[in-house]
Amino acid sequence: MKKWFAAAAAAVTVAALLGGCSAGGSATTGDKDVTLTYGVWSQDDTMQKLIDEFERENPKIHVKLQVNPFADYWTKLQVGAQGGTAPDAFWMLGDHFQLYAANDQLLQLDDAVKAAKVDMSKYPKPLVDLFNYQGHQYGLPKDFDTIGLWYNKKLFDDAGVGYPTTSWTWSDVQAAAAKLTNPSTQTYGIAAPLNRQEGYYNTIAQAGGEVISKDGKTSGYDSAATQKGLQYWVDFIKKGQSPTLKQFADTEAVAQFENQKVAMYYGGSFYAQRFYENKTLRPNVDVTTLPKGEKTATVINGIQNVGYSKSKHPAELKKFLLFLGGKKAADIQAATGAVIPAYEGTQSAWVKSMPQFHLQSFLDQVPDSVVYPVSANTSVWNDLEDKDLTPAWQLQEPIKDAADKLATGMNKALKNE
């Protein structure tokens, strides 16, 4: 892991770090003001509203928001964390978390959570567990997302097919996809891209398989159940009921759904606002829960707020992180409709913000959710997934051969973590 960080440092100079850094904050002495930095990858009014409210309650603590595009965010954060100049607080995802925690670059929150009597049951348990490393809690959930079955009502009406319901199974989707596919209008029944979070991770879980073992030491891609979850998607392409991987390279799956050329799309709750703001698309679409395979399941993931272990202001930083994970911050986020806040009891405002969609579908699936699969260095075997599964999605190799090869490479990567 030290070699990994060294490579990242070689790729980006210290001058490219995330704006100002924790080292630039004022000292914590007596009644002097303190400045914290907060690194995020998207800026909107919501983040500033959160900061404004926190500063109103804590007039001696100031927060400077630092925004970097997602494509640059992780590279710069890697260098900053290694060099001692990362932001005090910053956004974190599960697939990156363990690498930072294992290198002692994140602030443990156990004492702050205990002292403030934070009720961790107010957050979805899979998200709490996702940011617990070796018995210590490092993050408080900001928001979460699950996956739903988005569908185009107009295309369903044109084909004379009934809308999806909460009782649908894989076979219902397969039957509908056949009827909804119309070569003359170049309309497809479903989108089957090579997509982890919104695609095959869900169907692997629904088939009773697993991406990675519970102890994080072995791959699940060589199991029959996991391969069944992969085959579900490839069959749509094979039957001409989904665009091909090449077509997705030209126009991404979500854009094809927005262009109303795809009738069904497995998509995250994070697309709700995007679809809602598309005034042409909005009246034609809705969403329901994912169809059932051998069992019901959806992937759950989300952003968590974490702190930098080398922050010069740990006490103030913990206070800020507890605020960001609290009910007041969740209420502010919910009102915008941008995300599902993680704090229990605050999600109804998000549901009501776009009443044309059955957004409750995303919340109803939380009890059946499975956490996004991660390990200490997730990105290594994520790259293997893309490389080894692509030939199967291109119909050049059987799923079993591709998945068995992936399992071998993934097991080697996990052994080297």
Image: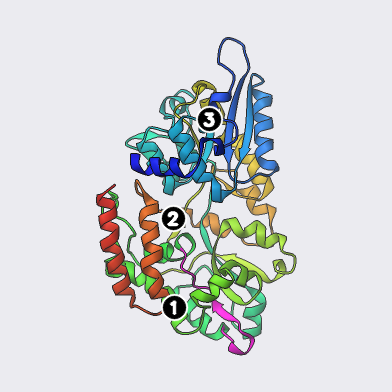
First-in-chain label (1 vs 2): 1
First-in-chain label (2 vs 3): 3
Query: Is any part of residue 296 visible from this angle?
Result: no
Name the residue carrying label 1.
171
| Most common secondary structure along the magenta stretch | loop
Task: Choose top left, top right, bottom left or bottom right for residue 135.
Answer: top left
Name the residue carrying label 3.
88
Q: Over which residues does the magenta segment extend?
A: 181-195
Q: Which residue is at the far right? A: 279
Q: Nearer the viewer, mark 2 or mark 3?
A: 3
Q: Is residue 68 above or below residue 151?
A: above
Residue 200 spot, x, y in % from top left: 42, 66
In the foreground, 19 or 58: 19
* Residue type, numbered disc 2: Ser
Q: Secondary structure at mark 2?
A: strand
Q: Secondary structure at mark 1?
A: helix
Q: Residue at image x 28%, y 70%?
A: 224
Give the spatial CA distance, label 1 vs label 2. Answer: 21 Å
First-in-chain label (1 vs 3): 3
Q: Is residue 193 magenta?
A: yes
Task: Choose top left, top right, bottom left or bottom right for residue 396.
Answer: bottom left
- Determine crowd level at label 1: few under 14, some 14-19, many 20+ residues with C-alpha closer than 10 A: few
Give the spatial CA distance, label 2 vs label 3. Answer: 31 Å
Residue 344 spot, x, y in % from top left: 54, 43
Name the residue carrying label 2.
369
Give the spatial CA distance, label 1 vs label 3. Answer: 49 Å
Q: Secondary structure at mark 3?
A: loop
